[in-house]
Amino acid sequence: MVKSFLTPRAEQMYPLIERYLASELTQKQFCQQEGFSRSTFLCWLKKYRRHQQSNAHPSCEFIPLHFAANKGLPIPAQPTCAVEYPNGVVIRLFGSINVQMISQLIRMQAA
């Protein structure tokens, strides 16, 4: 199972979002009552929903994929290249490197 750690700010904001979801207030009313801007609220609501969705699908964990090596070409013990995303996901590549594939992996994160 993937462990999900919250930032201190998320630990503060997620209970507020849950309180809003349990209330019958409009977003505008809730923001006025709690004293923060609607844009801040919407940002945290989006983060909360994304967090809930990622926790609802534990089968979406990353798993190692193993490919058969070309005969006669050893696979190095250490990765030749690693792509590390800001969210902590690391993709380690062993053997020869396809620069186009790495470029595509980086662009996928930016999207």
Image: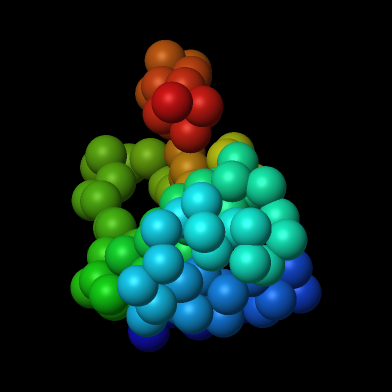
Give the residue displayed 60% in from the left and 41% down from the top.
39
Quadrant position of residue 50: bottom left
Between residue 42 and residue 60, name the one nearer to us: 42
Q: How many dots with numbers? A: 0
Q: Position of residue 110 (x, y in %)?
A: 51, 27
Q: Is residue 15 above or below residue 36?
A: below
Residue lying furthest right: 8
| Residue 91 visible to an observer of this rendering | yes
Q: Position of residue 111 (x, y in %)?
A: 43, 26
Between residue 6 and residue 18, name the one nearer to us: 18
Q: Position of residue 48 (x, y in %)?
A: 47, 64
Q: Quadrant of the N terminus?
A: bottom left
| Residue 96 visible to an observer of this rendering | no
Give the residue displayed 39% in from the left and 77% down from the top.
23
Q: Is residue 7 above or below residue 68?
A: below
Give the residue displayed 52% in from the left and 59% down from the top.
29
Q: Is residue 27 above or below residue 52?
A: above
Direction from residue 60 to residue 29 in the image, left or right = right
Residue lying furthest top: 100
Between residue 48 and residue 88, name the one nearer to us: 48
Quadrant position of residue 59: bottom left
Direction from residue 7 to residue 78 in the image, left or right = left
Quadrant position of residue 108: top left
Q: Is residue 53 above or below residue 67?
A: below
Between residue 96 and residue 49, name the one nearer to us: 49
Direction from residue 71 to residue 35 in the image, left or right = right
Q: Position of residue 2 (x, y in %)?
A: 43, 78
